[in-house]
Image (tube, rainbow, N blue to C red):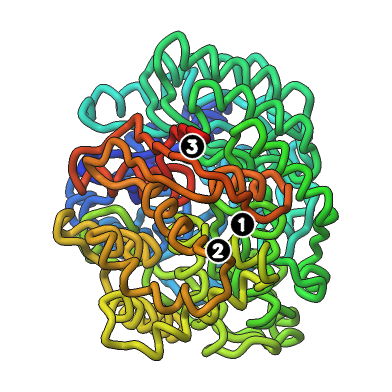
């Protein structure tokens, strides 16, 4: 019998504690393959390799491996390559198998890397099981869904494996494949993957679902419910929902109920992250309502746009619903005090710097003032966008840059991982993409976190100053006043953005109170500004006062702005105002326009979850609060005079 190892190395995102994902993909492959009598009689499963140990240490711990299979994504492919080389050096007869989303569906990996023997494509429950059976029966030349070298050493693609019509495969959780991991590592906080459906009806060019053309299929309900109970009973801290469109099916409401009940029963999972359906908003709203009651989904409903440029949307094969529909939807979430966030992608073909910045301003106009994310466009090898003809048509150029995990200690991996980001298109040069990232850092810190949101909103309503014009002017102010402390931080962030566009990722953003923990650029701006809140506002007052204000409302806006922003060890702040700023800003959140009413009032802003030190504040408010949702004190009491 051949000894089998399956490698799915995790990169844990932690801050002061050890966390790791259970190797779900590897477990699925093993559980499915062991349904085959041929596999059971021919292979001895030895272990899952899921922690990022040194390759030499991993090889030393192996017991005469016969087959080692590697699940590849962007965060572990270089590690997998190094480990495969080490295995081949010590065990030259061992077969190394590479599969997963980061393996191009062609023979290029076999052509480039002599230490890789076999490539495995398609849905692994079928293709990997067939591969192991082919090895056992010495008939690899007839095995579907793989690529191997022929007798002359020339790489050849085989025909695709059969497409599974249903997902009635065994569960690695329920069948005990991870039990030994939990026993061996009692100090690790484990996260897990929950898959309730597979496939996506959309064909977005940037996504590697796009080329798969796979029909959406559902995992049997009894299996899903049993896995949720398993996760609760085994104290899984965080669950990532693998579905592309959770909420697409009516039964997803029952799954949401099961997750809530599991948390109420055991306290686990503590939280979950889900990709919600793009066109089932009523059902998603109901699901978020359920999760909101127990603080289960930290991010809330996904109201994604990717772009608001009609040209870019057409180029990537995506169509957003109407602006008015989104405005009503966001208003509904805001009325019910439910979280939402939106996503955009920087570097899509057809986008320009102007259309991109106006797109961010537009989501503010729609009512999304609190939380948004912008991702640099990563070129995935198996996406439509990653194909040579598409890249040539749209003038796409990429830069290979080192991956760095924020919110972790600055421990450089001995084997760096890389991602290919789009740094130029036919409509956006490298410098514009760098400027676009800089604009993101400023708007996320100043508007989403809310450091000067009150002023931007007032100028939008009172003087029709577009949000993009307001924040571009703020960037100009920082450029023109380099002596300011905030301008010094801006200069560093600008260099960070420019370096990224060149494939350089060497700047690490640290705060003195968190030592070697790495922060995102927007978080870095916020944390530095709040170190001396009054000094920050003094520095930017000339910029803010350059705009028009009625009577003495500027002072009221500033007092309210300072009072509501959270700080460590500040439980409450009370200010006397001449204008009803609180009603004004909340009316704007609910899409009700109108200038602030002149009416004397006293505002008391209270923080009901005060963090007593900067490390906890940075972790729980800035990081966990995802910038926007916890930035303001959570209880506002108003006394009208």
Q: Pointers 2 and 1 in contact (CB under 8 A)? A: yes
CA gap between label 3 and label 1 equals: 15 Å
Residue 598 is left or right of residue 117, and the answer is right
Residue topped by disc 1: 343
**Image quadrant where residue 409 sits:** bottom left
CA gap between label 2 and label 3 equals: 18 Å
Q: Residue at x 67, y 52 (%)?
A: 367
Q: Is residue 611 above or below residue 41?
A: below
Residue 383: percent from left, percent from top:
67, 65
Mark linked to residue 519: none
**Image quadrant where residue 518 sits:** bottom left
**Helix, strand or loop for disc 1:** strand
**Image quadrant where residue 359 sits:** bottom right
CA gap between label 2 and label 1 equals: 6 Å
Residue topped by disc 3: 298
Q: Pointers 2 and 3 in contact (CB under 8 A)? A: no
Of 400 and 90, nearer the camera is 400
Residue topped by disc 2: 374
Compare marks 2 and 1 and give the one earlier in the sequence.
1
Q: Is residue 421 above or below residue 365?
A: below
Q: Outermost residue, top direction? A: 265
Q: Is residue 249 above or below residue 302?
A: above
**Helix, strand or loop for disc 3:** loop
């Amino acid at each position: 019998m051949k000894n089998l190892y399956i490698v799915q190395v995790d990169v844990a995102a932690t801050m002061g504690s050890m966390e790791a994902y259970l190797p779900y993909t590897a477990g699925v492959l093993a559980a499915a393959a062991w349904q085959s009598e041929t596999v059971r009689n021919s292979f001895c499963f030895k272990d899952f390799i899921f922690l990022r140990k040194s390759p030499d240490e991993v090889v030393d711990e192996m017991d005469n491996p016969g087959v080692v299979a590697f699940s590849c994504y962007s965060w572990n492919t270089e590690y997998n390559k190094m480990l495969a080389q080490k295995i081949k050096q010590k065990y030259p007869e061992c077969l190394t198998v590479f599969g997963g989303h980061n393996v191009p569906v062609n023979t290029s990996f076999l052509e480039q890397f002599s230490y890789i023997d076999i490539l495995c494509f398609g849905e692994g429950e079928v293709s990997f099981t067939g591969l192991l059976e082919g090895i056992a029966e010495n008939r690899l030349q007839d095995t579907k869904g793989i690529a191997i070298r022929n007798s002359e050493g020339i790489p050849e693609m085989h025909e695709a494996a059969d497409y599974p019509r249903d997902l009635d495969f065994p569960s690695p959780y329920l069948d005990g494949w991870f039990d030994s991991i939990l026993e061996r590592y009692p100090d690790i906080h484990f996260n897990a993957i929950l898959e309730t459906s597979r496939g996506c009806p959309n064909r977005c060019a940037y996504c590697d679902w796009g080329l798969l053309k796979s029909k959406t299929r559902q995992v049997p309900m009894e299996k899903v419910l049993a896995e949720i109970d398993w996760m609760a009973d085994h104290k899984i801290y965080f669950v990532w929902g693998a579905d592309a469109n959770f909420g697409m099916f009516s039964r997803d409401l029952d799954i949401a109920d099961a997750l809530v009940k599991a948390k109420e029963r055991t306290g686990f999972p503590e939280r979950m992250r889900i990709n919600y359906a793009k066109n089932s908003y009523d059902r998603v709203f109901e699901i978020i309502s359920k999760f909101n009651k127990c603080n289960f989904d930290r991010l809330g409903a996904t109201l994604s746009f990717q772009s608001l440029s009609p040209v870019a949307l057409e180029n990537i094969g995506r169509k957003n619903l109407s602006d008015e529909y989104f405005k009503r939807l966001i208003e509904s979430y805001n009325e019910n005090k439910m979280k939402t966030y939106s996503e955009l992608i920087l570097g899509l073909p057809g986008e320009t710097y102007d259309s991109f910045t106006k797109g961010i301003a537009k989501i503010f106009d729609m009512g999304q003032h609190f939380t948004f994310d912008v991702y640099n466009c990563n070129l995935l090898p198996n996406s439509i966008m990653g194909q040579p003809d598409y890249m040539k048509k749209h003038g796409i150029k990429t830069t290979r840059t080192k991956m760095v995990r924020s919110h972790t200690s600055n421990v450089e991996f001995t084997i760096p991982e890389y991602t290919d980001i789009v740094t130029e298109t036919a409509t956006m040069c490298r410098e514009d993409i760098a400027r676009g990232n800089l604009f993101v850092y400023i708007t996320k810190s100043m508007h989403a976190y809310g450091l000067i949101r009150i002023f931007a909103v007032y100028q939008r309503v009172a003087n029709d100053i577009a949000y993009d014009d307001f924040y571009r002017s703020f960037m100009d102010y920082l450029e023109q006043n380099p002596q300011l402390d905030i301008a010094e931080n801006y200069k560093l962030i600008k260099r960070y953005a420019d370096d990224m566009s060149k494939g350089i990722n060497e700047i690490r953003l640290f705060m003195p109170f968190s030592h070697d923990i790495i922060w995102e650029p927007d978080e870095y701006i916020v944390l530095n500004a709040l170190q001396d809140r009054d000094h920050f506002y003094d520095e930017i007052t000339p910029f803010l006062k350059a705009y028009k204000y009625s009577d003495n409302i500027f002072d009221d806006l500033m007092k309210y702005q300072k009072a509501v922003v959270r700080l460590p060890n500040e439980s409450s702040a009370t200010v006397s105002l001449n204008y009803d700023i609180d009603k004004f800003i909340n009316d704007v959140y609910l899409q009700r326009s109108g200038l602030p009413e002149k009416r004397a009032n006293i505002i008391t802003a209270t923080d009901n979850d005060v963090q007593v030190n900067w490390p906890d504040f940075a972790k729980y408010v800035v990081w966990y609060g995802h910038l926007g949702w916890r930035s303001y004190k959570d209880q506002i009491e108003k006394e009208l005079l």
